C-alpha cells in the first residue's frame, strides 16, 4: 500500500501473477487514459514531475472541465494529471489533432493522437 504520510487513502501496488498478467502490464486500458491524478496546480505539478523524469504525452492544456496533461507511468499506462480551470481562462482547443511520438518508455514508440473534445 502506497499513501502520503497521515493519509487514509492509498493505492495498492501488486505484481503480475503469471504470464497472462505480465503481458497486460502497461496495456490494461488498451492505450487510453485509465488513471487520474487530481492536483491543485497542474502547471506546477507538470514542471515538478517533468524535472523528475516523468514522460508526458501532452503539455498542460485547458479543457471545459479544467487543466489536464497526460503522462506515462513506468509501465506505460496513461494518466490524466487533472486540476481546476485557471481563473478567467477560456477553453481553447489549440492542441486538437496534434501528433507526437512517445519515445521515453521502451516499447511505447507509437504515435499518440491528442484530441480535444468540447
Image (cartoon, rainbow, N blue to C red):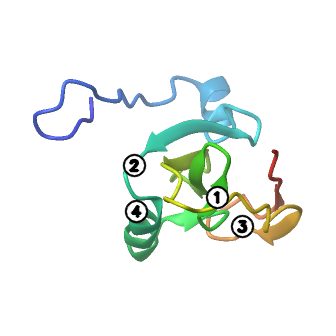
Element type where label 3 sits in the image = loop
Q: According to the image, label 2 marks what residue?
A: 39
| Distance CA(mark 3)–CA(mark 4) | 20 Å
Dot 3 or dot 2, earlier in sequence: 2
Element type where label 2 sits in the image = loop
Residue 93: mark in rendering: none
Dot 1 or dot 3, earlier in sequence: 1
For the image, the number of numbered tags is 4
Q: According to the image, label 3 marks what residue?
A: 102
Which mark is in front, 1 or 3?
1
| Distance CA(mark 2)–CA(mark 4) | 7 Å
Q: Residues within 10 Å of mark 4 (few under 14, many from 20)?
A: some
- Residue 23: x and y in percent read 68, 35
Q: Residues within 10 Å of mark 3 (few under 14, many from 20)?
A: some
Q: Is residue 97 above or below residue 74?
A: below
Q: Residue furthest left?
A: 6
Image quadrant in which you'd find residue 52: bottom left
Which mark is in front, 2 or 1?
1
Q: According to the image, label 1 marks what residue?
A: 62
| Distance CA(mark 2)–CA(mark 1) | 14 Å
- Residue 108: x and y in percent read 72, 58
Dot 3 or dot 4, earlier in sequence: 4
Do the numbered discs 2 and 4 sit on residues whose CB atoms are within 8 Å?
yes
Please give the name of the residue rendered at 56% of the width and 36% of the height, measured from the top-left corner: 35
Please give the name of the residue rendered at 20% of the width and 40% of the height, measured from the top-left corner: 4
Please give the name of the residue rendered at 48% of the width and 65% of the height, measured from the top-left corner: 54
Which mark is in front, 4 or 1?
1
Amino acid at each position: 500500500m502506497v499513501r502520503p504520510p497521515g493519509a487514509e487513502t492509498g493505492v495498492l501496488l501488486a505484481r503480475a501473477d503469471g504470464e497472462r498478467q505480465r503481458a497486460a502490464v502497461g496495456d490494461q486500458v488498451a492505450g487510453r487514459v485509465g488513471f487520474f491524478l487530481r492536483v491543485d496546480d497542474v502547471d506546477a505539478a507538470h514542471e515538478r514531475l517533468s524535472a523528475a523524469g516523468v514522460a508526458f504525452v501532452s503539455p498542460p492544456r485547458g479543457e471545459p472541465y479544467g487543466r489536464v496533461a497526460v503522462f506515462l507511468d513506468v509501465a506505460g499506462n496513461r494518466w490524466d494529471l487533472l486540476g481546476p480551470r485557471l481563473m478567467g481562462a477560456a477553453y481553447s482547443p489549440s492542441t486538437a489533432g496534434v501528433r507526437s511520438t512517445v519515445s521515453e518508455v521502451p516499447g511505447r514508440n507509437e504515435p499518440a493522437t491528442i484530441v480535444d473534445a468540447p
